């Protein structure tokens, strides 16, 4: 006989869980007690949204479900921000929520929420476990649901009395991974379509990739001379300095790349959904009927034909697809072979940062410095805001599992993601980028980095405004500024108050020595860049946007 709390931990161990992210609560004390005697590492966080985002980063970088525990009511609703990210980004996460005791349900008891209704639209599966004897069944099923097809978050509600009750349950067994593989007929059809194409283009996206799959995709691109683009915030899926790489298919796309995709006669979309942002509001690929011949490869059959009608639909995970297709070779040198290097040259030109701009701090030279200094396996994280343009456009990703950023455009992601990434990979450099508004969404997780001696470096780009919203505001309602000004703390002093290292950069030349001191400190660090708000994009000032010039 074991308590429900012990059975939860046993089921997690059986399914290979090695760490969890949590904010403690009295509603699941029985689980916390069971964790006391478990080899599972428990990372205590400062806010449930940050904990859920750490779990998302874990799932994003490893492909295994990130596990998060929160308490009922406010704890669960705070965590919903991370669950929405995981759902839109197709990341495996399992959120466990302590629930009110069974006798109090349906009475609007203290902090009671109906989680099936609350999370119903932003999770793959939501369930409440009423019988402790069924915990092994439900937890193992949660791992299967979170990782199969299109991965995503699962939410499990745990009534407090169920966790303390004793049950005679079967030992938990690990879930069985589900793989979807392409058939020979689909591979033959793709080979035939490529043989007829004159201007093909490949777009990589989604999840269920690994380092081996990325390497096989490179082999396919080389064999077929294919130009390859990576979907929004999926840049780690292809080496940016490879001669077949054509650029980021995301917000603020290179116009030459956009033209190439629109003019392609065949688009091979592998793993991604090609949603609103990467499709440039469904203009690169028209919905529901693309102008191009579309071959869509996706692990979830429900995504094939959901937004676009493909010419050829292949129900397969990216890793299984590239493994199967890697052995196929063209009969002759493809007709488009001479065009692929031109697209790569256009990418290199587009991704070269400008040297000048308004104000005393120039982000272009700073990005150049980071590109030269950071090793290829450095992990870069960020949330949302105009500052992220500098990272996505000018950082040239080289390796898999080096990027954690929300395709859902959620602010506040970078710092908690960096904490999780550094905890997972302590030997690697982990750099979080955040705007001043973005950092203060979940900046309290810097305390988590201090608590666990995780020397992340958070680059806070402080321009004193909600930059993206101000940019749109000035464009649509010039000179009528409302609700976008910010009065910020001294971020370097804040880092020191937490027990970390802090630096302030007010001139371009200050950045390199400040960054090197932060790196050498061995502490979690904040490097605050005080950026002129006029420097709102790499190519346009706020005044130019306001004046529509």
Image (cartoon, rainbow, N blue to C red):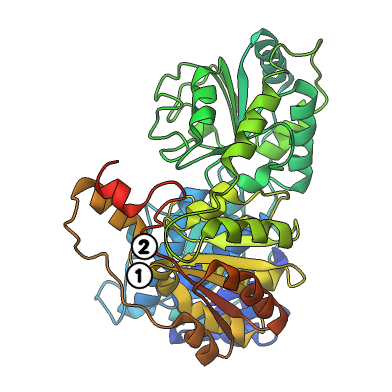
Give the residue at x 61% y 24%. 201
Task: Name the foreground residue: 18 vs 296.
Answer: 296
- Image: 506 above or below 411: below
- Image: 134 above or below 249: below
Task: Name the foreground residue: 139 vs 86.
Answer: 86
Q: Furthest-top residue in view?
A: 196
Task: Name the foreground residue: 273 vs 135.
Answer: 273
Q: Residues within 10 Å of mark 1 (few under 14, many from 20)?
A: some
Q: Provide residue 135's location: percent of width, then percent of height.
A: 57, 67
Q: Provide residue 57's location: percent of width, then percent of height.
A: 59, 62
Q: Which residue position holds label 1?
A: 464
The image quarter containing residue 150 is top right
Q: Are marks 2 and 1 in contact (CB under 8 Å)?
A: yes
- Image: 279 above or below 38: above
Give the residue at x 50% y 68%. 52
The image quarter containing residue 157 is bottom left
Q: Secondary structure at mark 1?
A: loop
- Image: 143 above or below 225: below
Q: Which residue position holds label 2?
A: 533
Which callout, 2 or 1, points at the residue further toward the start of the chain? 1
């Amino acid at each position: 006989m074991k308590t429900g709390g012990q059975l939860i931990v046993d089921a997690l161990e059986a399914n290979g869980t090695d760490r969890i992210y949590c904010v403690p609560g009295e509603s699941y004390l029985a689980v916390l007690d069971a964790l006391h005697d478990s080899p599972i590492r428990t990372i205590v966080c400062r806010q449930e949204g940050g904990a859920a985002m750490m779990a998302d980063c874990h799932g994003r970088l490893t492909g295994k479900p990130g596990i998060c525990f929160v308490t009922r009511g406010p704890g669960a609703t705070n965590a919903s921000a991370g669950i929405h990210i995981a759902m839109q980004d197709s990341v495996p996460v399992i959120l466990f929520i302590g629930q009110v005791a069974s006798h109090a349900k349906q009475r609007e008891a203290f902090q009671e929420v109906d989680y099936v209704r609350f999370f119903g639209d932003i999770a793959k599966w939501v369930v409440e476990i009423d019988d402790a004897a069924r915990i092994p069944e439900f937890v193992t099923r949660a791992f299967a649901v979170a990782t199969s097809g299109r991965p995503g978050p699962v939410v499990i509600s745990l009534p407090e009395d169920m966790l303390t009750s004793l049950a005679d349950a079967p030992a938990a067994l690990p879930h069985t991974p589900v793989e979807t593989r392409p058939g020979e007929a689909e591979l033959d059809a793709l080979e035939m379509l490529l043989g007829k194409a004159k201007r093909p283009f490949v777009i990589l996206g989604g999840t269920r990739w690994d380092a081996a799959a990325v390497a096989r995709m490179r082999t396919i691109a080389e064999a077929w001379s294919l130009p390859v683009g990576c979907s929004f915030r999926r840049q780690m899926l292809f080496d940016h300095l490879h001669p077949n790489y054509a650029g980021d298919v995301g917000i603020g796309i290179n116009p030459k790349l956009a033209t190439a995709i629109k003019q392609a006669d065949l688009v091979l979309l592998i793993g991604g959904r090609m949603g609103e942002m990467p499709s440039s509001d469904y203009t690169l690929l028209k919905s529901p009927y693309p102008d191009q011949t579309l071959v869509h490869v996706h692990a979830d059959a429900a995504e094939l034909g959901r937004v676009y009608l493909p010419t050829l639909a292949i129900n397969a995970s990216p890793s299984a697809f590239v493994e199967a297709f890697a052995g196929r070779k063209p009969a002759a040198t493809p007709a488009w072979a001479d065009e692929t290097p031109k697209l790569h040259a256009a990418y290199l030109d587009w991704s070269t940062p400008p040297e000048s701009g308004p104000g005393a701090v120039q982000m272009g030279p700073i990005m150049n410095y980071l590109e030269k200094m950071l090793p290829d396996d450095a992990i870069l994280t960020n949330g949302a805001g105009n500052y992220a343009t500098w990272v996505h456009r000018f950082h040239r990703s080289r390796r898999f599992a080096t990027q954690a950023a929300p395709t859902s455009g959620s602010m506040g992601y970078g710092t908690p993601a960096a904490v999780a990434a550094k905890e997972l990979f302590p030997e690697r450099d982990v750099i979080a980028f955040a705007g001043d508004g973005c950092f203060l969404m979940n900046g309290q997780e810097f305390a988590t980095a201090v608590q666990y001696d995780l020397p992340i470096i958070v680059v806070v780009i402080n321009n004193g405004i909600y930059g993206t919203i101000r940019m749109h505001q000035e464009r649509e309602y010039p000179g009528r500024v409302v609700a976008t000004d910010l009065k910020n703390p001294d971020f370097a002093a804040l880092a020191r108050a937490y027990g970390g290292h802090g630096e302030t950069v007010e001139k371009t030349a200050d950045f390199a020595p400040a960054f090197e001191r932060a790196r050498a400190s061995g502490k979690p660090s904040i490097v605050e860049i005080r950026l002129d708000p006029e420097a709102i994009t790499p190519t346009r000032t706020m005044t130019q946007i306001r004046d529509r010039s």
